[in-house]
Image (cartoon, rainbow, N blue to C red):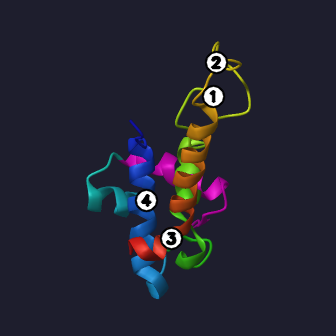
Amino acid sequence: MLRFSKKADYALMAMKHLALRGEQGSSSAREIAALYNIPIELMAKVLQRLVRRGLLASYQGTRGGYELARRPTQISVADVIQAIDGPVTVTACSTDENHCDQFAKCNVRDPLWKVRERILSALGECTVAELA
């Protein structure tokens, strides 16, 4: 089953929250965590990972917090998910590392890679703006 992690869910929730805030300014990790009943430590880790991937900007100080680093129309759901969970995979061989014992004989690898590409395309077309 294709399923994203809870961290990816939380990241998407935070991104939507920040997109809806728009020009109202930044939000703290504590504020976002409290609004959605998410442990603060977990939310802080998720937000920091999004900062490292260039999807969020963080600001220190009493009026500090997090804001989207780009317009919500320029951030795809795929960007957010891959920032948190890494590359989207549907099979053990979805990467080019060939770690599967059946790699040479597999007769569904190529069709499943096409499925993966379609999933990535769909996630890439959906933006944070659409979530908001």
Residues at marks 3 and 2, CA–CA distance in whole angstroms: 33 Å
User: Where 76 sits versus 4, above or below?
Assistant: below
Instruction: Tally the marks.
Output: 4
Which circle marks residue 127 in the picture? Answer: 3
The reply to whether discs 3 and 1 touch (Cβ–Cβ < 8 Å) is: no
The reply to whether discs 2 and 1 touch (Cβ–Cβ < 8 Å) is: yes
Q: On the image, numbered disc 4 is attached to which residue? A: 12
Q: Secondary structure at mark 2?
A: loop
User: Which image quarter: residue 105?
Assistant: top right
Residue range of the region highlighted in magenta in the rendering:
40-61
Quarter of the N terminus within the rendering: top left
Q: Given the image, on which type of amino acid does mark 4 rest?
A: Leu
Closest to the camera, between mark 3 and mark 2, is: 2
Q: On the image, numbered disc 2 is attached to which residue? A: 100
Residues at marks 4 and 3, CA–CA distance in whole angstroms: 10 Å
Q: On the image, numbered disc 1 is attached to which residue? A: 93
Q: Residue at x 58, y 79 (%)?
A: 71
Closest to the camera, between mark 4 and mark 1, is: 1
Closest to the camera, between mark 2 and mark 4, is: 2
- State the image coordinates of residue 89 (x, y, percent, origin top left): 56, 38
- State the image coordinates of residue 131 (x, y, percent, origin top left): 40, 71
Quarter of the C terminus within the rendering: bottom left
Which circle marks residue 31 in the picture? Answer: none
Q: Residues within 10 Å of mark 4 (few under 14, many from 20)?
A: some
Q: Residues within 10 Å of mark 3 (few under 14, many from 20)?
A: many
Q: Given the image, on which type of amino acid does mark 3 rest?
A: Thr
Lower sequence index among marks 3 and 2: 2
In the image: residue 128, left or right of residue 37: right
The reply to whether discs 2 and 4 touch (Cβ–Cβ < 8 Å) is: no
Lower sequence index among marks 2 and 1: 1
Q: Secondary structure at mark 4?
A: helix
Residues at marks 4 and 1, CA–CA distance in whole angstroms: 27 Å
